[in-house]
Image (cartoon, rainbow, N blue to C red):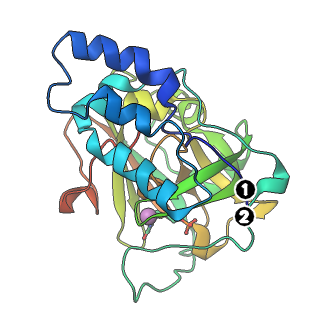
Amino acid sequence: MTETRITPALRMAEIQPELERLRRRGFLRRALSLGGLTLLTGCDLSTHSGIDAALEAILRFDDRIQKALFSPHRMAETYPASAITKPFRFNAYYAEWQVRPVPDNWALSVSGLVRDKREWPLAALMALPQQSQITRHICIEGWSQIGQWSGVPLGVFLRRVGADLSARYVSFKCFDGYSTSIDMASALQSQTLLALDFETGPLTPQWGAPLRLRIPTKLGFKSAKNLEAIEVTNTYPGGYWENQGYDWFAGV
Ligand SMILES: Nc1nc2c(c(=O)[nH]1)N[C@H]1C(S)=C(S)[C@@H](COP(=O)(O)O)O[C@H]1N2
Ligand SMILES: [Mo]
């Protein structure tokens, strides 16, 4: 079992000064006291109660505060290959969910505030610069595991299609009916990937083939699998879980 003291999304020591600043400005009146937060600095994710504590802490921040705390320069923790969880579990949005084969002639569609709206076949995505990461995936249900994903940094892709980087949202639609959306600052964080590979080979359908979002600074439900469409927009797009009350920002 892997020993991890602090969640990637929850480096309390790092965000403490920012919290203090926000509190001085009267921002944090509704949030947890700093004493309460300090209690969580030692979240041990190798135990269930540690994971619960970390999740609880994330969910106690409301979206506005999470967004204020977000720093594009704060990196999610990375791990050695020996820490990868095996077997890696998969998760879907409803119990009877079926593994979806990749549709014939799959291509990623791009719409909204972008200059170039051409579709992206897999081969074109594979030809873009790639990056690999070993990071922790934290599901809101209370489990976490470490995996390895490789693919195109979303920021590289957004610049390539001439996206309006001052737009507020990037939204994701999946061919299993799932959807989610993120803010532009999170989209441009360098660890946010359009992942093509899981471990050492192409994604399989269960784990999101042929393309998924992998965003280690947020909870697992933001890492949309089986992507088919990306839209850049200023209109709040919501998402499958977000529309049912989950925190939209879902990380710091
Ligand atoms: N398309 C799609 N993406 C999705 C989901 C889903 O049901 N459909 N579930 C989300 C949730 S809640 C989690 S925890 C992760 C699970 O990713 P994994 O199957 O690679 O472990 O995918 C997220 N992305
Ligand atoms: Mo999840």
What type is the residue that disc 2 sits on?
Thr
What type is the residue that disc 1 sits on?
Thr
- Residue 2's label in the rendered image is 1
Q: Residue 45 at x, y = what percent?
A: 58, 53
Q: Classify mark 2: helix, strand or loop.
A: loop
- Residue 129's label in the rendered image is none
Q: Residues within 10 Å of mark 2 (few under 14, many from 20)?
A: some
| 52 sits to left or right of 88 | left
Can you tell which of label 1 and label 2 is closer to the viewer? 1
Q: Residue 191 at x, y = what percent?
A: 60, 36
| 22 sits to left or right of 185 | left
Location of residue 7 with respect to 201 vertically, above or below? above
Location of residue 87 with respect to 214 vertically, above or below? below
Q: Quadrant of residue 104?
A: bottom right
The quadrant of the rendering that contains the N terminus is bottom right
Residue located beneath label 2 in the image: 85
Q: Nearer the viewer, residue 226 or 144?
A: 144
> Can see residue 115?
no
Q: Residues within 10 Å of mark 1 (few under 14, many from 20)?
A: some
Ranked by sequence position, the earlier of labels 1 and 2 is 1
Q: Nearer the viewer, residue 63 or 11?
A: 11
Circle 1/circle 2 CB separation < 8 Å: yes
In the orientation shown, which residue stands out farthest toward the bottom?
Answer: 96
